[in-house]
Amino acid sequence: MHQPDFDEIIDRTGTRCSKWDDMEAAYGVSPDDGLAMWVADMDFRPPQAVQKAVEQAAAHGVYGYPGANRPYLDAICWWMAERHGWTIEPSWILTCAGLVNGVAMALDAFTAPGDGVIVMSPVYHAFGRVVNASGRKLVELPLAQRDGIYGFDWPAWEEMLTGNERLMILCSPHNPGGRIWTADELTEVAEFCRRHDLILVSDDIHCDLVMPGCGPHRMIATVAPQIADRLVTLTAATKTFNIAGAHIGNAIIADAGLRARFQGALAARGVSAGMLGMDMVAAAYSPEGAAWVDALVEYLDGNRRIFDEGIATIPGLRSMPLQATYLSWVDFSGTGMAPAEFTARVQDGARIAANHGATFGTGGAQFLRFNIATPRARVTEAVARLRHAFADLQ
């Protein structure tokens, strides 16, 4: 395998890259002197196998309607079995235009306008955006903090339900908190959904990005097979291999009736996969791709240690222990500052664009989310800038 160079600084400005080209408009931080630590993609090239697949398609030079998708489906089945111990059938896989689209299709398939859709807050902001845009009612169940990490609060949550809820979205691993849910926790989720007759949509897009010693990540389908008749698992290669621009993801549904309803939503909206996306996924889900991910996770773990150690030296700041993803969730509540003040110090003082915690819903306002999937020199620089921006607290 070609040894990846994650330390390479790749200039992404001027490439229609949201993370770098849009951050000045979004945060007032110029790419000329700023650090982009917001959008959840990586500043790394994907494995050579992915690049080769794109180059082969370009060399052929004809870009017609794609067919013969069996290599793509077989690659997904191989990856799930090899990396996650989950045996699936090709017929279970329905392809959507990324996982936000997958959530939207699930809402179309399994709920009606006005129905309640449950999320555990704070959580990935696109869930709420899609729920609200579809005319459903967003039901936020606030996560509890225990020993500095997020956990479930079933007694409180039971009291919050109205009976109008039809679907729950589980973020596993959790974004932005970086939690890997345990087998017991996943079983509790499954039983909650059975008890309240909820469809469960489990977004597992970060399932491959588990920090050493923190796993394993478990697919809820393997922990709670008893809920197969109400379970949709969303997976994608896009986050793992930094190919989000392909806009391709999978809804893996074992139950034939549930799958038919989801397929109906896809058909009604004319959703189908693009040729290049399928080629990239088939190349990524391979032994070469697996070796690349192993190297990536080791590198991200090094970035995590540097970032966490730096945050720990700043009084009033605390990063939640990162078990999975490459997104550090930093709590600023110990500073006593209002969000406007600590955010200004990060953006205007440190010249870092980080996601505002309030966008993740209830419980997020005192946080910022930092993307550490960038060359280590930038992570080190970010720590130095943050220490300077909050130097009066030290």
Image (cartoon, rainbow, N blue to C red):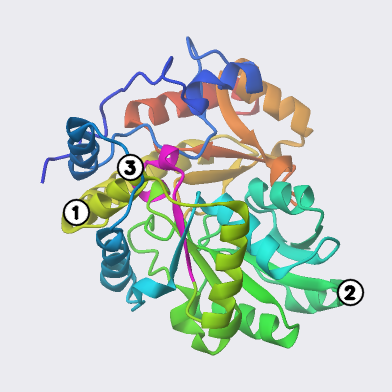
Location of mark 1 (residue): 291
Question: Could you tell which of marks 3 and 1 lies nearer the N-terminus?
Answer: 3
**Whether residue 292 is situated above or below residue 83 in the rendered picture:** above
The part of the image, by quadrant, that contains residue 90 is bottom left
Tag 3 residue: 276
Density class for disc 3 (Cα within 10 Å; few <14, some 14-19, many ≥20) is: some
* Magenta stretch bounds: 239-252
Corner quadrant of residue 203 = bottom right
Q: Residue 314, relative to residue 147: is it above or below?
A: above
> Where is residue 315 drawn, in percent x and y?
61, 37
What residue is rendered at 77% in x and 37% in y?
Answer: 336
Task: Report x, y in % for residue 38.
Answer: 55, 33
For the residue labelled by badge 2, is the local secondary structure a helix, a strand or a loop? Answer: loop
Between marks 3 and 1 in the image, the one whose residue lies nearer the viewer = 3
- SS type, badge 3: helix
Cα separation between marks 3 and 2 = 44 Å
| Residue 49 picture location, percent across and down | 19, 44
**The disc labelled 3 sits on which kind of residue?**
Leu
Q: Which residue is mark 2?
A: 162
Q: CA distance from mark 2 to mark 1?
A: 47 Å
> Is residue 138 in sight in this rendering?
yes
Q: Is residue 184 visible?
A: no
Q: Which residue is found at the position 31% from the left and 58% from the top?
A: 69
